[in-house]
Image: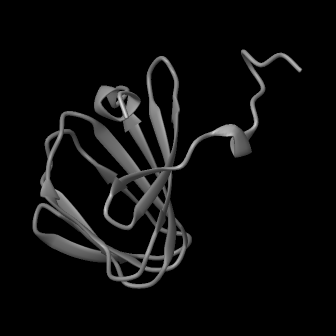
């Protein structure tokens, strides 16, 4: 198997990037892909960053607030968060989420 192209998801170390947010991070030359498991009741405070962010709910319900407008994401829904938009979130249930950031999250690469 050519490991420069094909890799095992199970070989990615899980990192707790915030209390209750457990991530497997993949970095490409232009994106960071964050596979996150979140425990119910855990939240991420209001923040912003230069990265455009696409957030997908794969399992569970996650309330995301973007520019002070709350929306519950459940499977089948996603959000596209513009660069520098204020946003926060709370897991209403245990969740599995995928976030895609562009450009690469160098702060996450350093974890």
Lateral position of residue 84 relative to residue 94, left or right: left
Residue 92 sits above or below residue 104 on the image: below
Pinpoint residue 100: horizontal percent, then vertical percent: 44, 42
Pinpoint residue 65: horizontal percent, then vertical percent: 21, 68
Quadrant for the N terminus in the image: top right
Kindly indicate the quadrant of the structure image that contains residue 111: top left
Taking the image as drawn, is residue 64 in sight?
no
| Residue at horizontal 75 percent and vertical 30 percent from the top | 7
Kindly indicate the quadrant of the structure image that contains residue 4: top right
Pinpoint residue 66: horizontal percent, then vertical percent: 19, 62
Near-viewer residue (72 or 93): 93
Taking the image as drawn, is residue 61 in sight?
yes
Residue 80 sits above or below residue 11 on the image: below
Number of numbered discs: 0
| Colour scheme in use | one colour
| Residue at horizontal 51 percent and vertical 79 percent from the top | 60
| Residue at horizontal 57 percent and vertical 42 percent from the top | 13
| Residue at horizontal 38 percent and vertical 67 percent from the top | 20
Residue 105 sits above or below residue 63 on the image: above
Residue farthest to the right, as pictured: 1
Lateral position of residue 58 relative to residue 10, left or right: left
Lateral position of residue 19 relative to residue 7, left or right: left
Lateral position of residue 110 relative to residue 69, left or right: right
């Amino acid at each position: 198997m050519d490991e420069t192209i094909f890799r095992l998801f199970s070989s990615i170390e899980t990192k707790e990037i915030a209390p209750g947010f457990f991530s497997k991070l993949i970095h490409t030359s232009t994106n960071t892909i964050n596979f996150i498991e979140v425990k119910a009741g855990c939240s991420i405070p209001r923040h912003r960053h230069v990265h455009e962010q696409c957030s997908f709910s794969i399992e569970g319900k996650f309330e995301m607030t973007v520019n002070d407008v709350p929306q519950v994401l459940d499977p089948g829904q996603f959000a596209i968060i513009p660069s520098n938009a204020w946003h926060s979130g709370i897991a209403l249930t245990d969740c599995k989420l995928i976030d895609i950031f562009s450009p690469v999250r160098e702060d996450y690469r350093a974890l």
